Amino acid sequence: MPVVRGKKIEVLFSASAIAQRNLELAKQVAARDYRDLLVVSVLKGSFIFAADLIRAMHDAGISPEVEFIMISSYGAGTTSGEIKVLRDIDNDVKGRDILLIDDILESGRTLKFARDLMLSRGANSVSIAVLLDKRARRKASLEADFVGFECPDYFVVGYGMDVGHAFRELPFVGVVKGDT
Ligand code: IMP
Ligand code: MG
């Protein structure tokens, strides 16, 4: 078991399993025939997944534009959770096909907010790609169009995802198991 920062990390999804899955996801995206695709990576957690998926998309023959949005959700586990745009995209989305990329779909509130925002700005379509789907935790009625893996109900880290700002750099997705 890898040890990072003195903690044992159990690997849930290996770097090679993720790379393999990204190629399949990119083919699924290519099969959709988007006309004017704008990828919107939801920061921070999606930065590694988005970087790998857009390169897999290149290999699948798609040439999207790429943008970034930073969204904060306070108290996302509660119905009163406030969601805010901390850093907006620079691009006009009117009439365009948007592909939101995020690390993990949990309650669904973050991505529902982002999708509704893009639709309110006149996007032609909004699709969602997530590396992980934690279905057991869903609160909003929202499905992703492209899902890397179904995720068991653990708090996961790595491949862009953090706990207290740590572990984003791990090339795999894992669960922190405790001190060595
Ligand atoms: P939700 O779908 O609005 O509940 O928010 C999902 C967001 O919460 C993701 O984009 C992550 O940033 C964060 N998140 C949810 N579950 C985890 C986890 O297991 N590890 C790290 N971040 C998580
Ligand atoms: Mg996130």
Image (cartoon, rainbow, N blue to C red):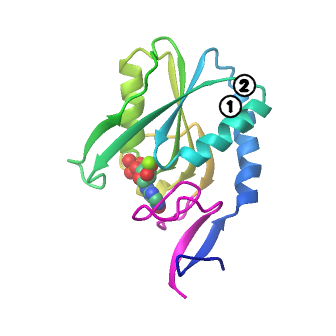
Q: Mark 2 touching mark 1, by CB under 8 A?
A: yes
Side (left or right) of 157 relative to 76: right
Counting from the top left corner in percent of width and height, residue 163 is at 43, 64
Where is residue 68? Give x, y as percent: 48, 33
Image vertical order of residue 133 relative to residue 156, above or below: above
User: Residue farthest to the bottom?
Assistant: 180
Quarter, ligand 1: bottom left
Over which residues does the magenta segment extend?
A: 151-180
Q: Quadrant of the C terminus?
A: bottom right
Crowd rating for badge 1 (residues with CA inside 10 Å; few <14, some 14–19, many 20+) = many
Which residue is tagged 1?
29
Is 163 drawn above or below residue 128 in the view shown? below
Q: Is mark 2 within 8 Å of ligand 1?
A: no
Q: Mark 2, mark 1: which one is toward the viewer? A: 2
Residue 51 picture location, percent across and down:
63, 41
x 41%, y 24%: residue: 118
Q: Amino acid at mark 2?
A: Ile
The spot of residue 135 in percent (x, y) is 49, 54
Q: Quadrant of residue 109?
A: top left
Q: Which mark is residue 62?
A: 2
Residue at the image position 53 percent from the left and 80 percent from the top? 7
